[in-house]
Image (cartoon, rainbow, N blue to C red):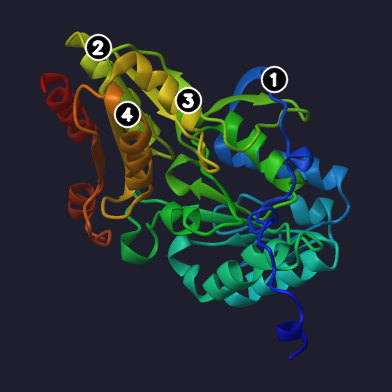
């Protein structure tokens, strides 16, 4: 009755408080200064980034299933952090809704929770907390409260994980206002983005592809402790002039190999690694498309309603006049990931599929 008795809201600031103000976001980007020329694995880059941010901010707390020492999580990402911060890194119950719900409460109390979900496939019990609670806090309080949780999630296939250890979940979270969603593909980007996530005033979904943790191609020299990557900034991984290939996560390496093979055939492919799903770097895509007039989007998630559909829609809506060929997507089949290795590879995208798609688009 009290609410009904007040004047109807004007709605002038309806969209003003979905995300933190721009002046609170990391916006500066510089070339990395490397600690040495020795490459580090992506798993170690994430660990070092977390350690540096915990040293910087005593309000950071972490928990998740088995993340405390000596195990340091099922993949060992947090190994050594309990010994360094014994009161701040703890194991959680086997209960994703509890992990995320407690994180939301701690964030409202002024802490900076960084929690781990062991596998993206097991995230769904926490979805109400993620969508209805954490994502809406700033908006429904008109910016008076914030809930800057970081949720680290191990995702992805190609490792014989079967239907319960192979999901890619970026599209589900890109659909929810209020969340930042990032998906690095190499050590340098993983460190820069986890440090930005640790300083963000918004909640962040930080996706870590299991197959890249120790993959040789994902190793890079390690940036120093001042290196941050602003959200919404993609990266050109290979310059080219004939076709734009937009991708992210582990599919970056399929795209790069396809581009290498196509170069021998006289096709010069530009490979763009989005790194950030939400916000999306439209500018880097459109700058490339103005040059190439052809575009393919490749990703590991299923084709139907995958995030590639959103990229394709924006290209078609805003840059249709630049296109010399249809927008094409290469993605996983609309299936769950089988446990049998040969069937897994038949479901997930491949270098050959990307190469074939490029040849079709170039021949159009």
Q: Earlier in the sequence, mark 1 or mark 4?
A: 1
Q: In front here: 157 or 27?
A: 27
Percent position (x, y) of residue 282? 47, 32
Check disc 3 and report the residue beneath it: 284
Q: Secondary structure at mark 3?
A: helix
Q: Which mark is residue 263?
A: 2
Percent position (x, y) of residue 132? 59, 72
In the rendered image, the quadrant that contains the C terminus is top left
Q: Earlier in the sequence, mark 2 or mark 1?
A: 1
Numbered disc in front, either 2 or 1: 1
Q: In front here: 301 or 146?
A: 146
Check disc 1 and report the residue beneath it: 30
Q: Within the image, what quadrant is residue 30 found in?
A: top right
Q: Secondary structure at mark 2?
A: helix
Check disc 4 and report the residue beneath it: 255
Q: In front here: 64 or 292?
A: 292
Residue drawn at point x = 38 percent, y = 23 percent: 271
């Amino acid at each position: 009755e009290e609410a009904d008795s007040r004047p109807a809201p004007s709605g002038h600031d309806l969209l003003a408080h979905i995300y933190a103000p721009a002046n609170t976001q990391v916006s500066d980007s510089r070339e990395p200064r490397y600690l040495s020329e020795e490459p580090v694995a992506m798993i170690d880059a994430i660990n070092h980034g977390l350690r540096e941010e915990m040293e910087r901010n005593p309000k950071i707390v972490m928990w998740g299933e088995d993340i405390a020492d000596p195990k340091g999580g099922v993949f060992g990402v947090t190994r050594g952090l309990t010994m360094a911060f014994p009161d701040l890194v703890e194991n959680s119950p086997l209960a994703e809704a509890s992990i995320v719900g407690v994180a939301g409460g701690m964030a409202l109390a002024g802490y900076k929770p960084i929690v781990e979900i062991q596998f993206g496939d097991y995230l769904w019990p926490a979805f109400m907390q993620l969508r209805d609670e954490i994502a809406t806090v700033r908006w429904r309080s008109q910016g008076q409260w914030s809930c800057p949780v970081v949720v680290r999630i191990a995702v992805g296939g190609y490792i014989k994980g079967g239907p319960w250890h192979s999901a890619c979940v970026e599209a589900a979270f890109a659909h929810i206002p209020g969340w930042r969603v990032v998906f690095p593909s190499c050590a340098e980007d993983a460190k820069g983005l986890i440090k930005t996530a640790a300083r963000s005033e918004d909640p962040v979904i930080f996706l870590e592809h299991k197959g890249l943790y120790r993959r040789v191609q994902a190793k890079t020299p390690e940036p120093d402790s001042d290196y941050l990557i602003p959200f919404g900034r993609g990266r050109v991984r290979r310059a080219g002039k004939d076709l734009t290939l937009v991708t992210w996560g582990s599919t970056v390496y399929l795209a790069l190999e396809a581009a290498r093979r196509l170069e021998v055939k006289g096709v010069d492919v530009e490979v763009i690694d989005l790194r950030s799903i939400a916000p999306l770097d439209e500018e880097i895509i459109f700058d490339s498309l103005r040059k190439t007039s052809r575009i393919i989007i490749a990703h590991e998630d299923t084709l139907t309603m995958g995030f590639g559909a959103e990229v394709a829609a924006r290209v078609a809506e805003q840059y249709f006049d630049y296109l010399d060929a249809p927008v094409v997507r290469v993605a996983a089949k609309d299936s769950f990931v089988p446990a049998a290795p040969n069937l897994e590879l038949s479901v997930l995208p491949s270098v050959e599929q990307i190469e074939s798609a490029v040849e079709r688009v170039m021949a159009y």
